[in-house]
């Protein structure tokens, strides 16, 4: 009985020791003390089971001291944080972009510095698949096609340091004729004018392997250091394992085409619907100089319509700067809207002016096609409701007197010339021709006044460049013009690319650079904006005694917001004080996003327009400002209003508002996706993306580890079986027999 009592005491100590050891590795010292305390008790025990248990426990504790609590994966992999993936999009006929295998695509890293090195690896390289790390100047269609056709490449890392100003001569992943299948001239058998001559079309290819941009210098250094040490021909390893490898994970759920993806998304599996893709889309922004009411409908040709696009595109997530292709026209429109809003009283009983910023135009005119569709269905800007007294007046294509589009604008055209593009098809109608002539003469007159070189594009039968105006002309012949800095082909050599930044435009926000060099583009855009603003004022009011002057400093402030930092003074003043604290120091990308998630730049742009063109509602609290939700004519926005920390926030009343920018293809019941009438672009849902590097052992070593593991596992089962079978011999009687 004495042995049994001592054994009971020991087992209690043993249980406590295990509890401490199991719950907290830091209690190892305490566990050891308890074991040593129990040791004096066990001296009285005669049973062999006590000695065996004690020895096993001591062995486990002392072994555990040499084991760290790090996760095994952290010992194997090094995660890179600055990655930006190429992703998959789909339309009615096919899929484009990039994707990895479900568990990630793995390959041995090879850093390519020239074409000959790449060709040698693809033709003679062994131990593939490879992950090719490549410089921007070799990231072209030819190299990508060579990698795809070789069958040896499992992924690509585009080494593009963010702290370096890397400028190539030209690079555009878009097509030579952007949006050619959905414009006014889509029935033509081929692209009659290659507007984007440097376009490679790689944005619209399905590459079959993941591609990531690596921008952070720390991550680039890790990749190159790992490559130089283990993979480089100069490392002295002579093709010996292990090699530096990378795992690229960017698994895309959507596949094949939009029709298939939507059908799969609508399937219910295990009582749960799994979304495979989302339609591309966001919101358009519109506002008028004068508020409108359905009680006073628009008449034919009573509104001048000024528009620009709000989005840009690129192959990679989070990188759509759109400086030349989008921002130049965007900031001009905002500046014009602000300038004309200061003369509202002059527009009373005259023509009204509507401004619009269209989203998704880079993907087959999503925003403009939806706006025209809503106009034709009497749903723009909002469907009329007889139960609501005050609503904005319906707007239709017939109400447009003149259509003016601010497209790509810069000082990079021939002799810094701005070209006026008119549609040769609609101009063949006499009434449209007369209205176009009136519009052209006014613009040329004001351009001369503001010292801008402006000319009509030639030849006269030159079709319109890719522009939103084409979508409106598909609905109705309208007088209109597209302003660009090019005549027959783009002066923008980086259209819809990651390099379409302020650098090619010579835009700088560094105070160390002389003011004259920093403001060349700003002055140029201010003169263009002044020309258009004064022309609109004259055409709308019939008055020619006033000149609308726009200062280049306003253009400069706007460029800071869209090209340099979203935490800019104008954005800080036009948002809620709480939101102002979270604005990033980098500019937001201009990618259209998907219908389910609005791009922050869309919200910021509307609030900025409200701040610059709206009216302050005095003596209203934040709650009162938000209580105007039933007002469909005006939108009330609570914003900071000033950079002064002690200043009170303000409530602004504005005509600026949203309209949907999602293709009608996703709103029409039983729409025929093969019809080619509306854009059908969707974006695949994807799981978490990641890039990590590690040392990959030889296949022989991997097989050795596998078989050793299987052998140890089998041996463990045999040992357990043997001990269980012979437990009475090995351990004698159990404690319960005492």
Image (cartoon, grey):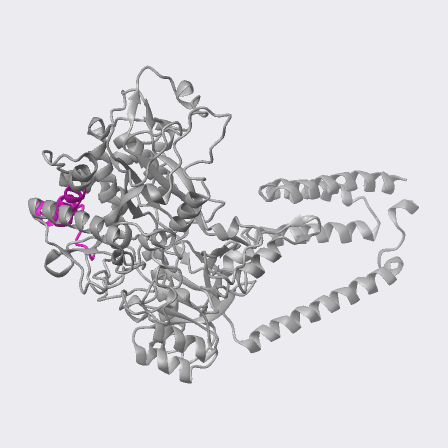
Q: Nearer the viewer, residue 309 or 555?
A: 309
> Image quadrant of residue 282?
top left
Residue 426 lies in what quarter of the image? bottom left
Q: Is residue 479 above or below residue 296?
A: below
Please name the residue shown 15% across and 49% down the image: 521
| Image spot of residue 472 (x, y percent) | 35, 51
Query: 17 above or below 203?
Result: above
- Residue 629 rendering spot, x and y as whole percentages: 45, 25
Q: Residue 102: image x %, image y %?
A: 56, 63
Which of the two residues, 319 or 615, is positioned nearer the viewer here?
Answer: 615
111 left or right, relative to 421? right
Residue visible at 35% across and 42% down in the picture: 601
Is 187 in front, or is 115?
187
The mark tally for this picture is 0
Quarter holding the C terminus is top right
Residue interval drawn in magenta: 504-532
Residue 620 is situated, as x and y percent measured from the top left of the image, at: 35, 17
Residue depicted at x 58% and y 73%: 702
Q: Is residue 104 left or right of residue 362?
A: right
Q: Quadrant of the N terminus?
A: top right
């Amino acid at each position: 009985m004495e042995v049994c009592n001592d054994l009971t005491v020991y087992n209690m100590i043993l249980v406590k020791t295990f509890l401490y050891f199991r719950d907290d590795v830091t209690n190892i010292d305490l566990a050891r003390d308890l074991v040593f305390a129990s040791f004096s008790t066990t001296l009285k025990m005669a049973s062999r089971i006590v000695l065996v248990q004690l020895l096993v426990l001591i062995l486990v504790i002392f072994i555990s001291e040499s084991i760290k609590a790090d996760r095994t994966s952290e010992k194997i992999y090094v995660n890179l944080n600055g990655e930006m993936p190429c992703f998959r999009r789909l339309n009615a006929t096919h899929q484009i972009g990039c994707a990895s295998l479900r568990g990630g695509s793995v390959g041995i890293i090879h850093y390519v510095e020239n074409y000959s090195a790449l060709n040698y690896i693809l033709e003679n390289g062994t131990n593939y698949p490879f992950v090719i790390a490549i410089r921007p100047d070799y990231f072209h269609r030819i190299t990508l096609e060579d990698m795809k056709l070789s069958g040896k490449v499992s992924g690509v890392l585009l080494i593009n340091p963010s702290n370096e100003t890397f400028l190539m001569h030209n690079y555009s992943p878009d097509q030579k004729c952007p949006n050619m299948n959905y414009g006014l001239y889509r029935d033509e058998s081929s692209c009659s004018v290659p507007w984007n001559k440097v376009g490679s079309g790689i944005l619209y290819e399905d590459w079959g392997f993941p591609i990531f941009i690596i921008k952070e210098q720390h991550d680039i250094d890790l990749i190159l250091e790992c490559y130089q040490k283990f993979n480089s021909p100069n490392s002295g390893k002579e093709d010996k394992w292990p090699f530096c490898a990378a795992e690229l994970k960017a698994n895309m759920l959507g596949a094949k085409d939009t029709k298939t993806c939507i059908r799969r998304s609508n399937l219910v599996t295990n009582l749960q619907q799994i979304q495979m893709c989302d339609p591309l889309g966001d919101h358009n922004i519109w506002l008028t100089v004068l508020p409108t009411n359905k009680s006073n409908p628009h008449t034919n040709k009573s509104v001048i319509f000024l528009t620009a696009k709000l989005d840009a595109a690129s192959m990679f997530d989070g990188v759509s700067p759109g400086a030349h292709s989008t921002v130049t026209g965007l900031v001009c429109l905002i500046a014009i809207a602000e300038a004309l809003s200061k003369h509202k009283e002059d527009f009373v009983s005259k023509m009204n002016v509507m401004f619009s910023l269209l989203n998704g135009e880079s993907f087959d005119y999503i925003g403009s096609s939806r706006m025209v569709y809503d106009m034709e269905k009497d749903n723009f800007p909002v469907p009329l409701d007889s139960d609501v007294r005050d609503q904005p007046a319906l707007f239709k294509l017939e109400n447009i007197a003149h259509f003016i589009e601010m497209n790509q604008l810069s000082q990079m055209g021939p002799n810094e010339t701005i070209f006026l593009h008119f549609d040769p098809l609609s101009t063949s109608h006499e009434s449209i021709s007369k209205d176009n002539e009136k519009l052209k003469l006014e613009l040329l007159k004001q351009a001369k006044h503001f010292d801008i070189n402006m000319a009509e594009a030639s030849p006269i039968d030159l079709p319109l460049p890719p522009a939103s105006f084409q979508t409106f002309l598909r609905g109705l012949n309208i007088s209109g013009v597209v302003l660009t800095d090019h005549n027959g082909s783009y002066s923008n050599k980086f259209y819809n690319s990651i390099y379409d930044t302020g650098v090619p435009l010579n835009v700088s926000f560094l105070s160390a650079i002389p003011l004259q060099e920093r403001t060349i583009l700003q002055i140029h855009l201010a003169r263009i904006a002044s020309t258009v603003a004064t022309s609109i004022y004259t055409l709308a009011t019939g008055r020619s005694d006033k000149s609308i002057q726009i200062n280049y400093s306003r253009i400069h402030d706007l460029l800071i917001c869209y090209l340099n930092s979203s935490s800019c003074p104008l954005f800080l003043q036009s948002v809620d004080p709480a939101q102002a604290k979270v604005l990033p120091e980098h500019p937001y990308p201009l990618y259209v996003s998907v219908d389910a998630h609005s791009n922050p730049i869309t919200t910021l742009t509307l609030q900025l327009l409200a701040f610059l063109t709206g009216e302050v509602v005095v003596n209203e609290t934040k709650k009162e400002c938000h209580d105007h939700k039933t007002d469909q004519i005006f939108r009330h926005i609570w914003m900071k209003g000033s950079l002064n920390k002690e200043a009170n926030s303000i409530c602004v009343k504005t005509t600026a508002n949203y309209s949907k920018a999602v293709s009608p293809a996703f709103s029409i019941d039983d729409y025929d996706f093969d019809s080619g009438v509306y854009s059908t672009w969707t974006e695949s849902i994807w799981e978490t993306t990641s890039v990590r590097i590690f040392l990959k052992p030889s296949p022989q070593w991997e097989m050795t580890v596998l078989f050793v593991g299987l052998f140890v596992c089998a041996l463990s089962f045999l040992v357990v079986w043997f001990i269980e079978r012979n437990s009475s011999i090995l351990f004698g009687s159990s404690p319960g027999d005492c």
